[in-house]
Image (spheres, rainbow, N blue to C red):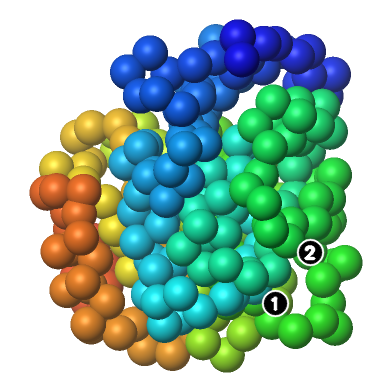
Amino acid sequence: MAASSRFLRTSGVHATIEPDRWREGAWVLSIDGAEQSHVNLAAPEDVFYEYLRRIANVVDLAAPAGEPIRALHLGAGALTLARYIQATRPGSVQHAVELERELLDFVLAQLPLPEGSVLATHIGDAREALAGFNGGPGFDVIILDIFSGPEAPEHIACEDFYREAAALLADDGVLLVNVGDEPGFTLVRSQTAALRRVLDGVAAYGESSLFSGRYPGNIILAGVQRPWPAAWSTQLTARGPHPATVLAGVDLDQLADPPQGRRP
C-alpha cells in the first residue's frame, strides 16, 4: 500500500498514512504534517512511540496477563493501543471516541484492525460521549490521549471531567492520561492536582529527565480508586523505556501544586 491522504473537515487539516521506512509492515499517521501515531500491522504488540509504550505497560498491569478487559479510548488516532490490547488480550471489548469522523474512517480503511477485534467507534466530543456509557459495566481501562500541548480543552482538562470518567471505572479499573507539555509543566501540574482530588491512588510515569521540568515531553498520569500499588511503581520502572521514573504518594507532591494563573 502506498501513502494516502484524507482531508479532515472538523479541524480543516490533512491526515496522511505512509509506510515507515525503517520497519517493514509498520505505518505512520501524521496530521497536519506532524507525526501522530505509529502502527505495526505485522506485530501490533510492538508499540514504537515511547509514551504509548508506557501506557501499554500500565495496561499490562490492569488485569492478569492475557485476560480480556473492557477498554475505553478517548482520542482514537491510529488505534495503536486498541490493536495492542487485542493482540495481548484477545476477546477484549473496546470502545473508541474520536472527534474527527473522517479520521476514524480513514484509519480503519487503510489500516484494518486485527481479525477478531471487538471495537465500537463513537464520533463526538470525549466528555459528551461519557454520558452514553453510564449504566453499563465498568471499564478496566480508560485512556485519555487528547492533550497535544500546553493548551488543552478546558472542559476536559478539569476535575469534573475526571470525576465523570472515574465513575465509569470498574472497582479495580485504571484511568490513564497522556499529558504532553512544555518546560515548566503547567498542564502536567494542573492535571496531576485535579486527578488527585478524584482518585485515591495517582502516579506520574515518564522519562526520568522530564521530572526536572526543564524539557518538553509526555508524562503519563495513572489513577486508581485505591492506594497506588507500590509494586506497580517497581514494575513500571523496570519495564522502561529507560531511564524511567514513577512518582506516587508524597513523591508526587512536586507535581501536584499548579502554578498561579491556571485553574485545574
Above or below: residue 40 compared with residue 145: above
Above or below: residue 38 compared with residue 241: above
Give the residue drawn at x 51%, y 79%: 67
- Asked whether, in this view, residue 110 is left or right of residue 20, the answer is right
Q: Which mark is residue 107?
A: none
Residue 123: quadrant of the picture? top right
Dot 2: within a 10 Å radius of its alpha carbon, few (fewer than 14), some, or many (20 or more) residues?
Answer: some
Q: In the rendered structure, are the residues bearing label 2 and label 1 in contact, judged by CB atoms less than 8 Å apart?
A: yes
Q: CA distance from mark 2 to mark 1?
A: 8 Å
Percent across and percent down for residue 30 are: 56, 19
Residue 29: quadrant of the picture? top right
- Asked whether, in this view, residue 1 is left or right of residue 230, the answer is right
54 or 219, which is in the foreground? 54
- Asked whether, in this view, residue 158 is left or right of residue 58, the answer is right
Q: Which mark is residue 130?
A: 2
Give the residue drawn at x 46%, y 63%: 88
Above or below: residue 135 compared with residue 245: below
Q: Which residue is mark 1?
A: 168
Three-letter amino acid code of the residue under disc 2: Leu
Three-letter amino acid code of the residue under disc 1: Leu
189 or 92, which is in the foreground? 92
- First in sequence: mark 2 or mark 1? 2
Is residue 226 among the parts visible in the rendering?
yes
Looking at the rendering, in which quadrant would you find the N terminus?
top right
SS for dot 1: loop
Give the residue drawn at x 80%, y 32%: 105
90 or 162, which is in the foreground? 90
Looking at the rendering, in which quadrant would you find the C terminus?
bottom right
